Image (cartoon, rainbow, N blue to C red):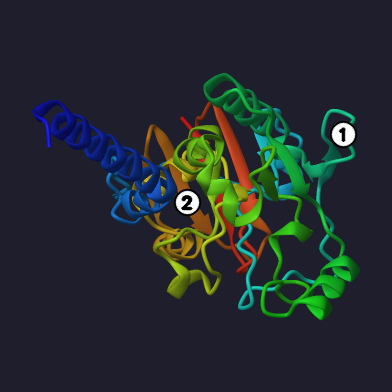
Amino acid sequence: MSKKLCVLIIVGSVLVALGALTALVAINFHHLYVWTQNEAMFCTPIDVNEIASVRSTRHTLAGLKADERVKLDQSLMLVNKQYLLSDEFIPDVFEYNDTDVYMSRCMLAAYAELSAAVMEHTGKKLYVSSDLRSADEQQALYDEDPLTATVPGASEHQTGLALDVYVAYYAGDAFIKSSSGRFVNSNSWKYGFIIRYPSYAEDVTGIRFEPWHVRYVGHPHADIIYNNHTTLEEYISSLEIGRWYEAQGYLICRQQLAKDGTLALPEDFESCVISPDNTGCYIVTVKP
């Protein structure tokens, strides 16, 4: 065998091996990405510090509704099989940009920003495959596939706070295989969203990894949940009732209505968001 033929065979073998390796990496890249998420490799932990005391005054919900600094919404409602929605629950939803997609009014602007960011960074349009659902629609889904769908009252889709998203050719489990899916999973917190059922917390949420299911919680809660590698269940549970916390320049307090129907707010503040958490409490988020 000539030296030239040997060189050609070696070069050919190397090129075949490199091609196979490239294909293998491409096929399994999303597995590597999920592993980095499981290990919180790109998270920057956020301190949530308890404050000894906050000078506060008490306000009725009616009085707070009249305060232009205060927004009452449903952004921090915990919805699962333990904390079911009541039959009387009415979601505060609005149609998004004449698209026949209905979502919670509090997340309209945030979703527009997330959608624009996906287009800017990945060149793909973000679509919604599932938005608001009625209890009857949830029941029909559960009857059809009880292993995947949850029971009526336990679905976040009934609040309008959750969306199932996708891009062309990449929906459901395939969403994470796209650059858009990975962008959403890594960056949605910057726009006030979390991946509600992350790959590392099925034992907590009771739901397998759903990379397509985004849930609005707002700031700084999304920042904390993502970067502290936790879940909505664990985050809300970590807020002791009646205690004030500081994080990311916000004051946060989970509290129950007093017997006189009032909540405590700092004496002076710039803005405030108040949401029921569906456990019998309200979460007050204040920008001092």
Q: In the rendered structure, which amino acid carries the disc numbered 2?
A: Cys
What SS does tag 2 mark? strand
Q: Which residue is drawn at 46% across and 39% down?
A: 220
Give whichever of 248, 226 is nearer the camera. 226
Asked whether the viewer can see residue 42, the reply is no
The percent coordinates of residue 226 (x first, y second) are 41, 47
Task: Tell whether label 2 touches label 1 (CB within 8 Å).
Answer: no
| Residue position for label 2 | 253
Q: In the rendered structure, which amino acid carries the disc numbered 1?
A: Thr
Asked if residue 278 is positioned above or below residue 226 in the image, the reply reads below
Give whichever of 54, 284 is nearer the camera. 284
The percent coordinates of residue 211 (x first, y second) are 55, 52
Residue projecting furthest to the front: 1
Give whichever of 131, 119 is nearer the camera. 119
Task: Count every numbered label the image shows and give the total.
Answer: 2
Among the 4 quarters of the image, the one containing residue 260: bottom right
What SS does tag 1 mark? loop
| Residue position for label 1 | 99
As drawn, the label of residue 212 is: none
The percent coordinates of residue 21 (x first, y second) are 30, 44
